[in-house]
Image: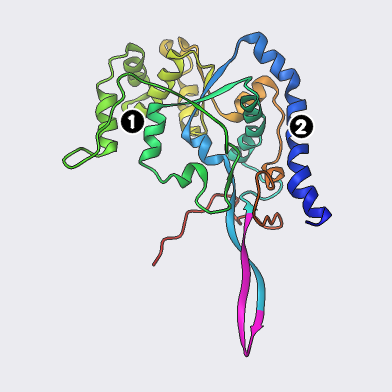
């Protein structure tokens, strides 16, 4: 391995991790003092946590005998361009510091039975990456699942779909806070409302989401007595980061983390958005 590659693959990830850990030291003390221990994480955050995807990088045409053929290779590339703007990217830049606090057990990032259930009805690549070289900031992080004693589902002949079973479960919920929030925010938000109630009932500091419509909806109802009664907050990573003065960092600096594959940071997706997998035709 050449010196440049050793720096990129071996040294750079360690430097980046130590930098974030150092910047988080004062925040860590503040979080411990305030007794903030757990956060419920929405699947929208896991989706945006995939910051690198697999792309075919062309090496141009080369002669193969008398024939010219297109050559290239698969590489890991960043999703976002350098200096990308937009609310999604602004929140993504706070994720490394949040995840660092979780890896060092300062914060506990949690999922729930219903959040895991949502994943069952979507391609797993949405949350982990579709391609062989894709990379998520959450990779390797153990997230505790908050269990609901009433959660159950059935699979088999004659069973209703998982989506229909989810609707049935939520419709049967008798939690008074859940019913009150349904009245305020609307039945169409029932899944998100249950996540908020789960965070509230389990003393999570916040429900961390990148569903900006939900955040806007709650902000519009902030003076409603039911919403005001909530101890748990509904925050984007950007809002959480600004609240505790967390450091930001470009996800492009994580290009070589856990990389045992070709990496090319000269390219990114043209629209700085994750790509949907192509269907075989």
The residue at the point 78 percent across, 43 percent down is 11
The image quarter containing residue 196 is top left
Determine whether 60 is above or below 280 in the image: below
Magenta: predominant secondary structure element? Answer: strand
Magenta segment boundaries in residue numbering: 62-76
* Mark 1 surroundings within 10 Å by alpha-carbon count, few (fewer than 14), some (14 through 19), many (20 or more): few
Helix, strand or loop at mark 1: helix
Pick the front one: 239 or 75:
75
Residue 95 drawn at (x, y percent): 62, 33
Residue position for label 1: 188
**Which of the two discs, 2 and 1, labels the residue nearer the N terminus?**
2
> Residue at the location (73% across, 24% down)?
24
Tell me the quarter of the image containing the N terminus.
bottom right
How far is the residue under mark 2 from the one under mark 1?
43 Å
Colour scheme of this structure image?
rainbow
Which is more foreground, mark 2 or mark 1?
2
Q: Secondary structure at mark 2?
A: helix
Q: Residue furthest bottom?
A: 66
Q: Is residue 21 left or right of residue 130?
A: right
Residue 18 got which mark?
A: 2
Instruction: Locate residue 50, reporting x and y percent.
Output: 56, 43
Reply above or below: 68 against 3. below
Residue ranking furthest to the left: 158
């Amino acid at each position: 391995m050449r010196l440049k590659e050793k720096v990129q693959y071996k040294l750079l990830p360690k430097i980046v991790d130590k930098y974030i850990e150092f910047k988080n030291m004062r925040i860590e003390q503040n979080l411990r003092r305030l007794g903030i221990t757990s956060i419920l994480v929405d699947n929208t955050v896991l989706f945006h946590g995939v910051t690198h995807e697999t792309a075919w990088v062309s090496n141009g045409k080369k002669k193969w005998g008398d024939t010219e053929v297109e050559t290239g290779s698969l590489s890991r590339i960043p999703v976002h361009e350098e200096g990308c703007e937009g609310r999604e990217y602004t929140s993504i830049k706070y994720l490394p510091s949040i995840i660092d606090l979780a890896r060092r057990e300062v914060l506990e990032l949690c999922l729930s039975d219903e959040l895991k259930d949502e994943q069952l009805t979507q391609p797993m690549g949405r949350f982990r990456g579709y391609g062989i070289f894709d990379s998520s900031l959450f990779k390797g992080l153990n997230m505790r699942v908050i269990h609901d004693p009433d959660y159950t589902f059935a699979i088999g002949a004659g069973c209703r779909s998982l989506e229909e079973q989810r609707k049935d479960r939520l419709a049967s919920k008798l939690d008074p806070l859940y019913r009150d929030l349904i009245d305020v925010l609307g039945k169409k938000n029932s899944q998100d409302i249950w996540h908020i109630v789960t965070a509230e009932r389990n003393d999570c500091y916040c429900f961390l989401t990148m569903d900006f419509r939900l955040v806007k909806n709650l902000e519009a109802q902030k003076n409603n007595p039911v919403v005001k009664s909530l101890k748990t907050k509904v925050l984007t990573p950007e809002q959480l980061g600004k609240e505790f003065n967390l450091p930001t960092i470009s996800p492009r600096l994580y290009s070589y983390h856990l990389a045992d594959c070709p990496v090319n940071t000269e390219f990114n997706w043209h629209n700085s958005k994750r790509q949907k997998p192509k269907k075989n035709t």
